Image (cartoon, grey):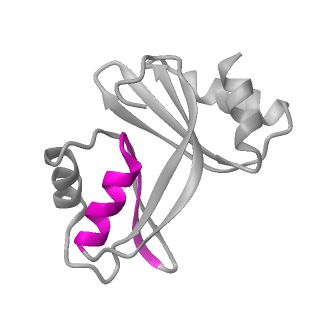
Amino acid sequence: MRQAETGTVREMAEFVVSLSDQHIPPKKLLATLTTSGDEVFAHLLNGDDRGLSLLLVTSDSLHTELILRYLGLEHTIDQVVVAKLPQQVGSAALLGMRLREAGVDIHHSYISLSKPGVLCAVFKTNDNQRAVMIGVN
C-alpha cells in the first residue's frame, strides 16, 4: 500500500518491536526506516508489564523485516486492518463503532498521522477480512 489515498482500508503487517533490552531508541529506528525508503504509516510506543515496544506499520513489510533483522531487534508480526482516513475529529472512532456494531471484536487500536491531513487508524481484530469489507463500504 504505497502512497495509498485517503479512504483505503487494507489488511497489513504490524511489527511489534521489543525495545526493553535493545540498543536503539524508537526515534532512531523510525529515522533508519524512513531514510532507507520505508514510509511509516503508523506507529505507537507501547509499554506494559513485559516492557517497552514499538507498534509499527510500514509501506514495505519485507524491507522492514530485513532492516529489523539486520539491526538485531526482536519483533513479532501481526496482521491488522489499516484505514487511511481524512484528518477529521471522530473519523477513526466512527469506523471503530461500525466494526463493533457489525460484530467485529477489536483487540487494540490506535491512530497515527501518516502525512499531513491523513490519519491512519490501525485495528487488531478477530476478523480482519470482515473488518476490511465493512471499512470499504
Residue 21: quarter of image: bottom left
Residue at 49% of width from left, 80% of height from top?
50
Q: Is residue 71 above or below residue 65?
A: below
Residue at 50% of width from left, 50% of height from top?
13
Residue at 78% of width from left, 46% of height from top?
105
Residue at 31% of width from left, 74% of height from top?
73
- Percent position (x, y) of residue 98? 75, 26
Q: Looking at this view, is 69 or 41 the one in front? A: 69
- Percent position (x, y) of residue 118? 38, 22
Q: Is residue 124 above or below residue 93?
A: below
Q: Is residue 64 above or below residue 76?
A: above
Q: Is residue 66 magenta?
A: yes
The stretch of residues the image draws in magenta is 51-71
Quadrant in which the N terminus is drawn? top left
Q: Is residue 64 magenta?
A: yes
From the viewer's perspective, tell me whether residue 75 is left or right of residue 28: right
